[in-house]
Structures are given as C-alpha cells and as structure tokens.
Amino acid sequence: MGTSRDYLSLKSLSSKIIGRLCHCGFDSKYSRLDAKLERKMRDEKRKRSGQIRFNSSESIFSWFPKFREGLKSIKGVFEQYDEDSSGVIDRDELKKCLEKLNLHKEEKEIDELFNSCDIDGSKGIQFTEFIVFLCLIYLLMIPSSSSFMVGSTELKETFDRIVDAFLFLDKNGDGKLNKKDVDKSLNEFYPWEKSPGNISKNPFMEMDQDRNGKVGFREFLFALIKWVGIDDSTGEMDSDEEISDGE
C-alpha cells in the first residue's frame, strides 16, 4: 500500500497538471482575456434579460444533441486551416485563418487568443481548442452588425445557445459562475443516472480547473464541449454513453 507521503506527492502533481491545463486564474498572463469575457457575459445578461433560452438544467441537457451537431460542423473548417494535416493548427496557420476571416489583429492579440486556447501547452490548437477559439472570436471580435463568416447560421445559433446556458447558471449576472448557484441549478435534474453520461457528479469542480471558486466562460466552454461528447480526433462522442435527443 502507498504511504501518506506518496498520496501527498500524487496530489501535488495532480494540482500542478490541473493548473497547467487551464492557463487561467492565477496566471495574470491570461487575466486580460478572462476579464473581457466577464464583461461580455455581464453585458449579454443585461441584453438578454427575459430572453434567455433555458429555464432549467433539463432544458440545457435536452439541447446537448444540437450543441454536439453544431460544434461538429466546425471539423471541416479546422481541417481546412490545418494545412499540414498534423491535427493541430500552429501560429502561422492561425494567422492565415484570421486573415481569411478579415480579422487583422495585432500580434499581441493573436498570441493572447492562441495561448488561451492552447490549454495543454502543445504550441498548437487541437480541434476542441479550435472550437473555443472560434467562439471567442465570435463573442469578442465580430461586430454584432456583421455576419459570422465561419460555418453557418446553425453555428451562430449554437454559440448563442451556449452563452444562454452560461447565463442561466450565472444567477447574479457578474459574468462568473459560483459553486452554490451551479450546484443548485444542475441538481434540479434528478436522478443523475439519467443525466448526460459525460457529466460528472461534481460538475463545478470539473469546470473550475484552477480551483479559485469561480468559473469563467472559457472554463465553462471547455467543460461543455466534453459534456456534449466532442473529442479532438474525430469530433464525435468520446464516450459510449448516448445522449437522447430533446424536443
């Protein structure tokens, strides 16, 4: 049997890995982008008052198949910009992607987006990270009067509904999620055995990668992508669990 010292060492290593996987919270290098997202979520909460699509956790879960299909549609776009078919989009390929979108941004802004989406520090953006990248582009860089130039109307609706899901959980409208509100909202849907198979029984901890007690939109989005069953290699479900279609 392992000693308590072994356990503490493993726990410490686990904490370091979790911190590296998120690149947010304690690392001020990413605080600017997270602050922008918080402001955006606060603004959206005010704009969408009384118009948020979801009114229960069950209504969010019933949308999981639509989330999955909408996000899977990005796979073709990802492969288009992954010119060397390496399975990742590097910085040069990312710049070409932005140019194609007619988004001429400063090097600093490109680096900020790239680093915030490259959660595993591989120096390249994998498919699930590219989903987050496009969603952040849509939320922070595309004027509301402009059409979204990647994907389709379905993708735009998918991103808007993901924002709605976040806003439903953000009860006080401060642009961040707290454990009390998330637990209360998600625990409305019982039993857990009938909830989507990719969601753990402690969803807040799963989202709160840096363990600071708050979950921003970026953390939420990474968790949601996993919950609806998208993986890097295929864009398909990464679990044997099936998610039933909602109404």
Image (cartoon, rainbow, N blue to C red):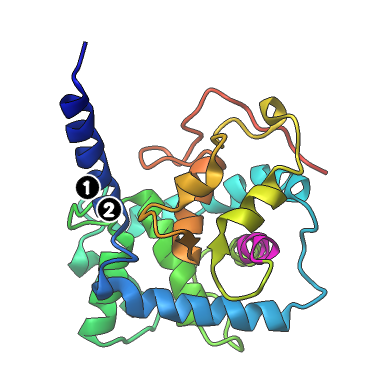
Q: Is residue 16 above or below residue 1?
A: below
Is 48 or 201 nearer to us in this picture? 201
Residue at 32%, 56% (x, y): give it: 22
Residue 196, by quadrant, is top right
Residue at 17%, 26% (x, y): give it: 6
Residue 121 locus on image (x, y percent): 20, 54
Residue type for callout 1: Lys
Tell me the residue that label 2 is attached to: 19
Q: Which residues are magenta?
A: 161-170
**What is the number of the mark on residue 46?**
none
Classify residue 26 as left or right of residue 232.
left
Picture quarter with the C terminus: top right
Label 1 neighbour load within 10 Å: few <14, some 14-19, many 20+? few
Say which element carries label 1: helix
Picture quarter with the N terminus: top left
Classify residue 25 as left or right of residue 61.
left
Count how many numbered circles sit on residues in the image.
2
Say which element carries label 2: helix
Residue 164 colored magenta? yes
Residue type for callout 2: Gly
Residue 182 locus on image (x, y percent): 63, 53
Residue 18 locus on image (x, y percent): 30, 47
Label 2 and label 1: CA atoms lie apart by 5 Å
Tell me the residue that label 1 is attached to: 16
Residue 71 locus on image (x, y percent): 53, 52
